[in-house]
Image (spheres, helix red, strand yellow):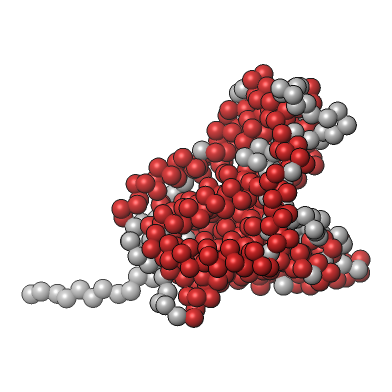
């Protein structure tokens, strides 16, 4: 006689039920306490007159929940707002800068890591690779260098946080988020918007500077810098947005939309020209050659059509700009500007020779370089003016030696090696394709070229650099090859 066994749904043990109830009670208590604390802090800020911070604090819980669900919007908000906050004059503007640049990226990254660890959000965290280990190593030795070697560690740590920690947080967010259809939907219009706004501000600074805030006019009449007040950051930002715009246009059917995006790409080229930065001109020429190699047919047709037209337009309407360009290239002042940097480069090399392993300390170059400067042929640095180094990599070697420079630059060769290995697995056509990967490497090359001639003093440029490396890392280390 056979008996039939009925399998009933498994119920939680009583101990498990009690654990769930206690966990809910604990989270309820924590949330209630947090809300009460935020309300008290908001009331205090209103009394102190910082009402804008109080409003931001009130909306903070909703913002955190939103970022937990859509973390890529942290990158979107940074790209959208940070370019216009690099130069601030009022206390309110500076506090907004702290919120957007100093707070948004680490908060977003922290939410992503914590929510995944606590299983609040089902997300597959990518495992760390060699580039990330090199970045962590650089962060560690830099903090030790500041604490042990810098005469003003507090202020230097703040600058280090702005210039290194925040950009690497942006790398981490992109590394975890990409590849994602939602992120790409936001990234494409952002690239177009960045190119149009920065090039547009650059043009206005020449033709109608009175329409722009005074904070963006430090180089008015000399160079176009957009809202970033740095020719090198301005032009590399244009390259990032312009190349992504060009790639997007090449994945569209022929029509007015494709023509409009091609116009945005040409606006990028003109924006680089009116920067009147020789390093940016060199970078722009190499960048156009790279685009020609990646898109030979489309780029050849564009150049064939526009070069004669550009010569005619330039000869008729751009005579003053071309005259200023010739002066930037051939004048005695231009020669002196270029040659006066050689004694500083010699100083950086001598500093590296004396301390080749760990260097003289993070951000300490200007403290010691004068004692190592001397005559270079017929060129000597003027005593009355302490020029800074215009080569980021020589400064890095002098300040942090081979160890620091090696860790900081290690992601580039590692990611390049993995890009070559991933190349055949990526589709030939489509937005996420081989061509996108090489265009992103063109953006990195643009940063490398400019960094050899101009310091990246505005931290937005460093954020763009690490964000681009994050996009490359996300592509080459992802199992997915299509969006």
From the image, which quarter does the N terminus lie in? Answer: bottom left
Residue that appears at 75% across and 37% down: 336
Front position in the image: 422 or 211: 211
* Foreground pick, 457 / 278: 278
Q: In what quadrant of the picture does the C terminus appear?
A: bottom left
Residue 412 point in image, percent of width and height: 50, 42
Along the line of sight, the residue nearer the viewer: 476 or 176: 476
Q: Residue 214 location, x and y as percent?
A: 84, 63
Whether residue 77 is visible here, answered yes or no, is no
**Picture coordinates of residue 147, whole percent (x, y):** 73, 33
Between 348 and 277, which is closer to the camera in this rendering?
A: 277
Indicate whether 362 appears above or below 4. above
Instruction: Determine the residue located farthest toward the right in the rendered image.
Output: 48
In-image side of 252 versus 383 (left or right)? left
Q: Is residue 205 above or below residue 132?
A: below
**Left or right relative to 119: residue 401:** right
Residue sitting farthest toward the bottom: 256
Say which residue appears at 76% left-offset and 40% top-offset.
332
| Image: 354 above or below 483 | above
Relative image position of residue 390 (x, y in whole percent): 69, 38
Identify the residue at image location x=41%, y=51%.
Answer: 477
* Residue at the spot 53% in from the left edge and 58% down from the top edge: 174
């Amino acid at each position: 006689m056979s008996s039939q066994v009925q399998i009933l749904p498994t119920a939680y043990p009583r101990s498990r039920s009690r654990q769930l109830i206690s966990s809910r009670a604990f989270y309820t208590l924590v949330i209630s306490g947090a809300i009460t604390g935020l309300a008290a802090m908001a009331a205090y800020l209103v009394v102190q007159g910082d009402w804008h911070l109080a409003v931001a604090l009130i909306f903070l819980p909703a913002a955190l929940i939103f970022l937990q669900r859509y973390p890529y919007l942290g990158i979107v908000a940074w790209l959208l707002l940070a370019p216009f906050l690099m130069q601030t004059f009022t206390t309110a503007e500076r506090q907004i800068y702290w919120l957007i640049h100093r707070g948004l990226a680490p908060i977003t990254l922290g939410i992503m890591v914590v929510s995944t660890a606590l299983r609040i959000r089902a997300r597959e965290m990518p495992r760390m690779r060699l580039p990330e280990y090199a970045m962590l190593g650089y962060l560690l030795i830099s903090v030790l260098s500041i604490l042990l070697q810098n005469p003003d560690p507090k202020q230097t740590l703040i600058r280090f946080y702005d210039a290194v920690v925040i950009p690497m947080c942006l790398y981490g967010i992109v590394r975890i988020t990409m590849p994602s259809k939602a992120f790409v939907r936001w990234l494409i219009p952002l690239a177009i918007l960045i190119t149009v706004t920065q090039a547009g501000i650059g043009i206005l600074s020449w033709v109608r500077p009175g329409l722009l805030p005074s904070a963006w006019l430090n180089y008015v009449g000399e160079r176009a810098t957009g809202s970033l007040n740095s020719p090198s950051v301005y032009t590399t930002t244009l390259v990032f947005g312009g190349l992504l715009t060009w790639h997007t246009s090449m994945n569209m059917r022929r029509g007015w939309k494709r023509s409009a995006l091609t116009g945005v790409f040409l606006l990028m080229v003109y924006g680089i020209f009116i920067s009147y930065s020789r390093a940016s001109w060199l970078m722009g020429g190499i960048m156009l050659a790279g685009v020609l190699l990646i898109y030979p047919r489309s780029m050849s047709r564009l150049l064939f059509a526009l070069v004669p037209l550009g010569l005619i337009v330039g000869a008729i309407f751009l005579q003053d700009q071309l005259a200023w360009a010739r002066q930037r290239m051939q004048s005695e002042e231009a020669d002196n500007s270029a040659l006066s940097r050689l004694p500083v480069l010699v100083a950086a090399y001598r500093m590296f020779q004396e301390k080749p392993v760990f260097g003289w300390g993070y951000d300490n170059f200007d403290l010691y370089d004068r004692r190592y400067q001397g005559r270079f042929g017929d060129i000597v640095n003027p005593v009355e003016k302490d020029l800074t180094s215009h080569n980021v990599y020589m400064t890095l070697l002098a300040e942090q030696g081979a160890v620091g420079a090696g860790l900081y630059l290690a992601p580039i060769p590692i990611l390049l090696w993995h890009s070559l290995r991933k190349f055949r697995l990526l589709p030939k056509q489509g937005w996420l394709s081989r061509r996108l990967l090489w265009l992103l490497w063109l953006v990195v090359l643009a940063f490398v070229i400019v960094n050899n001639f101009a310091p990246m003093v505005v931290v937005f440029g460093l954020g763009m650099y690490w964000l681009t490396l994050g996009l490359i890392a996300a592509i080459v280390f992802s199992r997915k090859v299509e969006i």
